[in-house]
Amino acid sequence: MAETLEQFHARSINDREGFWAEQARLIDWNEPFRQVLDYSRPPFARWFVGGTTNLCHNAVDRHLASLGDKPALIYVSTETGAERTWTFAELHREVMRMAAIMQAHGVGRGDRVLIYMPMIAEAVFAILACARIGAIHSVVFGGFASNSLAARIDDATPKMLISADAGSRAGKIIEYKPLIERALGMCAHQPDKVLMVDRHLAAFEPVPGRDLDYATEREAHIDAEIPVTWLESNEVSYTLYTSGTTGKPKGVQRDVGGYAVALAASMAHIFDGRPGETYFATSDIGWVVGHSYIIYGPLIAGMATIVYEGTPVRPDAGILWQLVEKYRVTVMFSAPTAIRVLKKQDSAWLTKYDTSSLRSLFLAGEPLDEPTARWIAEGLGRQVIDNYWQTETGWPILSVAHAIENTPVRHGSPGKVLYGYDVRLLHEQTGEEVGANEKGVITIVPPLPPGCMQTVWGDDARFVSTYFESIPGRMVYSTFDWGLRDEDGYYFILGRTDDVINVAGHRLGTREIEESISSHPAVAECAVVGVADSLKGQVAVAFAVLKDPDAHAQPDRKLALEGEIMAVVDKSLGAVARPARVHLVTALPKTRSGKVLRRSIQALCEDRDPGDLTTIEEPATLDQIRDALGR
Ligand code: ATP
Ligand code: MG
């Protein structure tokens, strides 16, 4: 009889080494590992010790015999109109050319390459080329401000920087070269070479002796044959920063073998993607979803992956589904924020195209409120699967694993605990485990499973102190998120540990209030923060975005809605949770990865400095908050 998810999970914890040795067969090894897990230096885990493998080999070369002439990379830009497919054989050639360029300019095993690029195929070639030769890639979200780029350059100390003349977003050209030059002007470290892909979107002046032109270099290495460099499983594959939603971004470092195995396993068990099919993740290569589920995961599984430069609403709100139809996408991955953008549009777009190829739409990155989950699931008539994880873990912690067991999804819950993770909900102060339906900090008993971060890049002490020392008396990994588990094992995310507010002695998760407000049919999305109050300690203050943008011009309607929203909260959570104010705005401040910057909103509400804003998407949204507050 087939295993249940619960049995599968139990085996992954009780027979950790046996379980992961079995999963390790999903990828190719050049030399077998001697030891599944070395946990002699807690909390540092070393997986598949002594084994040699390569991420690029597993993503590309391994498929050449069976899938060589099948699509591997499908590039679509609604910004430039470009659309092109590379087969696995063609992708292999391009990656070898890129690897040859790197090697010719002195980049070798263990050297860092900083990739600051828009969503173009060359970014994928560059990432895979690094993996191929054992160089460590550090991707910085394209278009980030110079100061964030500079900090990451100094942290990674790359030999080479790879970039492009420009990115484009919603029709607006973002010139990269001036941002790079400004960043390098601030840096202590200078890369030897800057490789520039010229898209002919913005003119720029190359720096003689330092800047290289990709087209010229590619021509020079057109016939290059660069074999993969076999790496020990625990060598470093890449570094990547967290989104910076709660503070200063943390530099996550990942290995080679553990990551490859974790992704292969997740594709098989959770995403259920099969060779020859097409995967479409709408994220960006600058985020962990881009690393795990635009590039490595789908390719390791032998799937074609769509790399999309564009927004969900251009040229119209049907574009994502048009691509699903055209490329017969079977597995899709997006973020709640993208779905909320679509929710403001006509839902007829959801049925305009044939999306019957789609088995599941996975959503992650932020709490997926029940109304939004239901809207998209019903509108598309496809299965919508929430999944909860972090840059640090690299792959889902909570979800369902339909290739193991057909666990029903429950909208509003990201699902159950997945194999590999020994998740415990702990009381913040006592460190005791909480019972069913009780709120606790979501923690993971180490060792963390394969694929999770090895350490903070260059700072083992920070890894331990940041993640493993927050719960008194227990060395557990903290996610810094609140959660709750019901009797059936379904989890609910109740917000960040720093998002809990205390109103006259009652501890409330801002997320619960947000969920309640989102259930009002006029609300597209909202953010709730706790604001210091001399009488009650803290009060909740809400900022809501309406589905109907015209409502903002109607003061009576606005006033009525504020009252209705408060009434909704009263009814579902009680008057204690009722926001002291409901401000209606047209947009919320978010990180570039689509996460609401609650800490900045809260700071403005308390008349403080909004803090580190290097990852903010639209600084003007903060002005709306200031206006609403009358500042
Ligand atoms: P930083 O750690 O720098 O403050 P961040 O936590 O936003 O930024 P990410 O690693 O991109 O950086 O995001 C992980 C976080 O996103 C999780 O800890 C959780 O708070 C939230 N999250 C991710 N997926 C979900 C989900 N399905 N439901 C609820 N929250 C989610
Ligand atoms: Mg985080």
Image: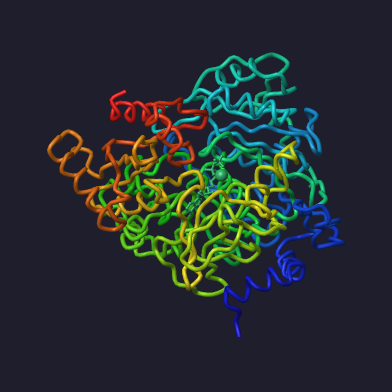
Q: Quadrant location of the C terminus?
A: top left
Q: Is residue 320 left or right of residue 120?
A: left
**What x and y, as percent, mark residue 40?**
84, 56
Residue 294 appears in the figure: yes
Q: Residue 592 versus residue 624: which sits nearer the camera?
A: 624
**What x and y, as percent, mark residue 398?**
54, 61
Q: Is residue 607 left or right of residue 569?
A: right
Q: Quadrant of residue 132?
A: top right
Q: Give the residue displayed 56% in from the left and 57% down from the top.
A: 427
Q: Give the residue displayed 64% in from the left and 62% down from the top.
A: 421
Q: How is the image coloured?
A: rainbow
**What x and y, as percent, mark residue 385?**
46, 61
Q: Give the residue displayed 64% in from the left and 59% down from the top.
A: 67
Query: Residue lying furthest left in this view?
Result: 556
Q: Quadrant of residue 396?
A: bottom right
Q: Quadrant of residue 288?
A: top right
Q: Does 136 appear above or below 610?
A: below
Query: Residue lying furthest bottom in this view?
Result: 1
Q: Residue 515 versus residue 270: which sits nearer the camera?
A: 515
Q: Does 171 appear above or below 523?
A: above
Q: If the picture is divided into quarters, which one holds ligand 2?
A: top right
Q: Is residue 517 left or right of residue 53?
A: left
**What x and y, as percent, mark residue 351?**
30, 58
Total marks in image: 0
Q: Quadrant location of the N terminus?
A: bottom right
Residue 223 appears in the figure: no
